Amino acid sequence: MAIGKLADSWSDPLTVTALNERIRETLEQSFPYVKVQGEVVSIRQPASGHIYLTLIDATSQIRAVVWRTTVRRLTTPLVEGHRFLITGHVDAYPPRGEYQLVIEGVQAVGAGLERERLLQLHARISAEGLFDGARKRPLPLLPATIGVVTSASGAALQDIIKVLKERCAGVCLLLAPATVQGAQAPLAIAAALHQLNQDGRAEVILCGRGGGSADDLSAFNSEEVVRAIATSAIPVISAVGHEIDLTLADLVADQRAATPSAAAEMAMADSNSLALQLAGLRHRLQRSIQSLCRHNRQILTSQQLRLRHPRQLIDHHRRRCDELLERLMNARSIPQQKRHYLISLQQRLMALAPQAILRRGYAIVTTEDGNLVRHSDQIGVGTSLHVALAQAALRVVVTEVVEKAASYSPSPPVGEGVGG
């Protein structure tokens, strides 16, 4: 009879809720108190104040929660990547059919296995000089083609496309899709980077994904991804969507952006901003040219006012002679000996007047720009000269320059000078 009733009870169908409730009761009765040692990863604390995390070892993981009332009592803070001795009990959440470890006490044990692996990899890569600032390459100002390594279905790609459309609609986007989370992600990301390098069209590469937990971002702490970025012939911007912690990909990349959107802004300058800068530079250039032209025009005008033709000098001396002669003729109260002396001075002055010298067969020679020719080193073969005579003027071209020692030049009469 008992066997029959037991068979009937197993044959009765259960609702999903009823089954989950029975599982919850069984877990609570079987594990009212447990002590577990493991590594804490994927810590998050929403606005509710509860702390959600994952406890892992080398091969397994279990979800865990610290209720808000317990958080206030903890004396040891939970740190990502560290190992802890956890005390609590196992509970189930029927609406989702999931079980979890409810943490009631925490005791620190030490650095976790994943953290130790990460520290060792960081030390090895750093020793090779792959994090050195001297390796960082400048980004192109306006790349025609931008390569992207991310998930083809992720929000990161849509964010990048939106930003690039707003900043420069004509840019070409070259996508190398890759899995960015999970065990296959490191090799997939590295292969996508190699693919873009072999293609060669991209001038800069954005490599990353949207935000997530430390466990979700672990691919960007892998040796495969780090070395693929380090060996890339094309500059790489890491675009892993996290603000606080740095990944090894951030350290080895040429530039690091906090989000994929920020990476797109870093890769492509804003065309509107560049247009405003160019307009400002053009205005400054025009003002500089105008100022330079005004300055040079003032200098030219000043030089033109100072420049005088030799004929003007001759006319000036002629007027001066006439004035002196008129003054001499009007000085009738001067004694006779003074008059003879003045007449002598007048004769000497008239003999030295440029026009008188010209009438005696001499000439005044000037260059085309009006400078008097006083020495032979001012002219050469082919030089054009202006020759002023008593009754005419000549324009000549020098065909030969003969040194004074090799030619005969008659000496002027005593008391007379030579103009020119």
Image (tube, helix red, strand yellow):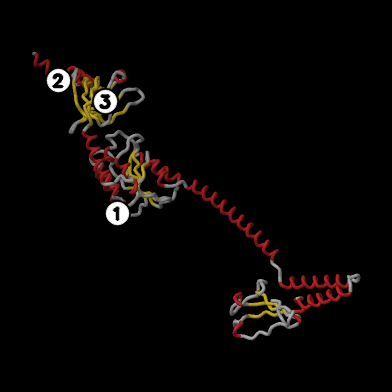
**414 sits left or right of 213 in the view:** right
Picture coordinates of residue 206, whole percent (x, y): 35, 45
Secondary structure type for disc 3: loop
Q: State which quarter of the image contains the N terminus.
A: top left
CB of mark 1 within 8 Å of CB of mark 2? no
Residue at point 31%, 23% (across, down):
50
- Camera-near label (1 vs 2) is 1
Q: Which mark is residue 198?
A: 1
Depth check: give the residue in front, 168 or 376.
376
**Image spot of residue 47 (x, y percent):** 36, 24
Count the marks: 3
* Separation of marks 1 and 3 at Cα, in angstroms: 46 Å
Q: Is residue 259 left or right of residue 119?
A: right
Tell me the number on the disc at residue 97. Answer: none
**In front: mark 1 or mark 3?**
1
Kindly identify which numbered label has been placed on residue 10.
2
Q: Provide the residue designation for mark 3.
A: 96
Residue at 91%, 71% (x, y): give it.
332
Q: Nearer the viewer, mark 3 or mark 2?
A: 3
Residue drawn 75% across the image and 82% down it: 360
Residue 86 in which image quadrant = top left
Is residue 126 shown left or right of residue 313? left
Residue type beneath disc 2: Trp
User: Which three-letter amino acid code belongs to the residue tagged 3?
Assistant: Arg
Camera-nearest residue between 295 and 239 = 295
Task: Bin the neighbour count of mark 1 within 10 Å (Cα to Cα): few under 14, some 14-19, many 20 and up.
Answer: few
Q: Earlier in the sequence, mark 1 or mark 2?
A: 2
Q: Dot 1: what SS?
A: helix
Quadrant in the picture for residue 22:
top left
Q: Is residue 26 above or below residue 354?
A: above
Sequence-earlier tag: 3 or 2? 2
